[in-house]
Amino acid sequence: MSIIKAPALHFGDTLAVIAPAGPPDPEKLDRGVRLFREAGFKIHFGRSVTLRNHYLAGNDVDRADDLNRCIENPDIQGILCARGGYGSMRILDRVNYDSIRENPKVVMGFSDVTALLLSIYRRTGLVTFHGPMPAGPHLSDWSFDILLRQITGTIRTGVPLVPPAETGSGTACFLNPPVAVVTEPILGGCLSILSTLSGTPWEPADQAFILFLEDIGEAPYRIDRMLTHMIHTRWIRSCRGIVLGDFIACDQRPDDPEPTPTVTEVLRERLQHLSLPVLKGFPVGHGVHNFTIPLGIPFSIRGDTLIQEESGVESLRRG
């Protein structure tokens, strides 16, 4: 696959905020948009952020058209998905991938938006950004600083990533035999979305990659089921290493019918038999700390560290 990078964003550029999945909470959206404005960006609100159709931000046509219009608009340099929820998969067949290929722009989101990010990468080769959303979970100053560095092309590459100390990240590998260094493009996101994409035209092509996983609100047995499914698909067959992010509120619930293992125990039990390095505890996902990951960019696992090898954006504007 030929990889395309979007031009790096500059402070003063216009970012469109759209809702390809669920409707955003107005107060949360205002709080998040304020951060981008204070950083120096202009904001264009897509029509979808004001629409509501039960648990969706308007109907499928409205949400897809909003994305397509923002891609084609030359006055918009980047696109932020307002929140996740549910609905991104419903518009994948309505996205104008030819237009995206011709007008590469930064596109960012996570959670349910994982489906949209990976389908764009799969169909166009465009590097997309798994990162915080304006109306998503509260994020730390560290997370927002990383986000800005990723989309402006000023992220430091080629060195071990150093998350905040309280995350407990980089706590060694589970699996044997140990592998000294693995360097491949990184792909992944919300486990429940990746599992759902398996076997569809939207999952990434069969290529070697490093897989990262995170999720929220899933019981341990559901994590077990989804991992087991993925072990039998190209997701695990093609990956050369695994990075585990946050699994928020994924331990036993009061209404579970019987005692269950912890999510950490499930992850270990399902993955330890694979001949792959597994880095656990990396701050990506639904927690306060959410490292922005450019999908399709080479990363390396070296021992208990993760290294981004290059920027996810072009340093110069196109034509």
Image (cartoon, helix red, strand yellow):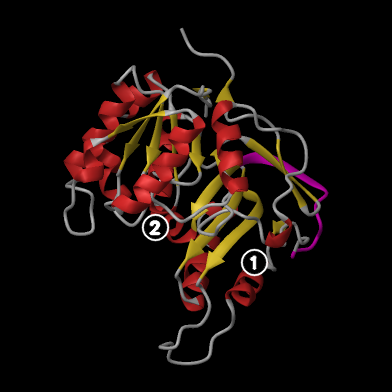
Range of the magenta residues? 174-185
In-image side of 167 versus 225 (left or right): right
Residue 142 visible, this angle: yes
> Dot 1: within a 10 Å radius of its alpha carbon, few (fewer than 14), some, or many (20 or more) residues?
some
**What x and y, as percent, mark residue 293?**
57, 42
The residue closer to the viewer here, 52 or 172, is 52
> Dot 2: within a 10 Å radius of its alpha carbon, few (fewer than 14), some, or many (20 or more) residues?
some
Q: Is residue 231 above or below residue 261?
A: above
Count of all numbered marks drawn on residues in the image: 2
Circle 2 SS class: helix
Residue 275 visible, this angle: no
Q: Amino acid at mark 1?
A: Leu
Q: At x 49% / y 62%, what residue is drawn? A: 215
Q: Quadrant of residue 80?
A: top left
Q: Are marks 2 and 1 in contact (CB under 8 Å)?
A: no
Per the rendering, the mark at residue 200 is none
Q: Quadrant of residue 158?
A: top right
Q: Amino acid at mark 2?
A: Thr
The residue closer to the viewer here, 232 or 269, is 269
Q: At x 26% / y 49%, what residue is drawn? A: 90
126 inside magenta stretch? no
The residue closer to the viewer here, 312 or 75, is 75
**What x and y, as percent, mark residue 236?**
58, 55
**What x and y, as percent, mark residue 57?**
23, 49
Q: Is residue 139 above or below residue 102?
A: below
Q: Is residue 63 above or below residue 13?
A: below
**What x and y, as percent, mark residue 307?**
73, 41
Per the rendering, the mark at residue 196 is 2
Circle 1 SS class: helix
State which tag comes first along the sequence, 2 or 1. Answer: 2
Q: At x 47% / y 34%, what residue is drawn? A: 38
The residue at which mark 1 appears reads as 271
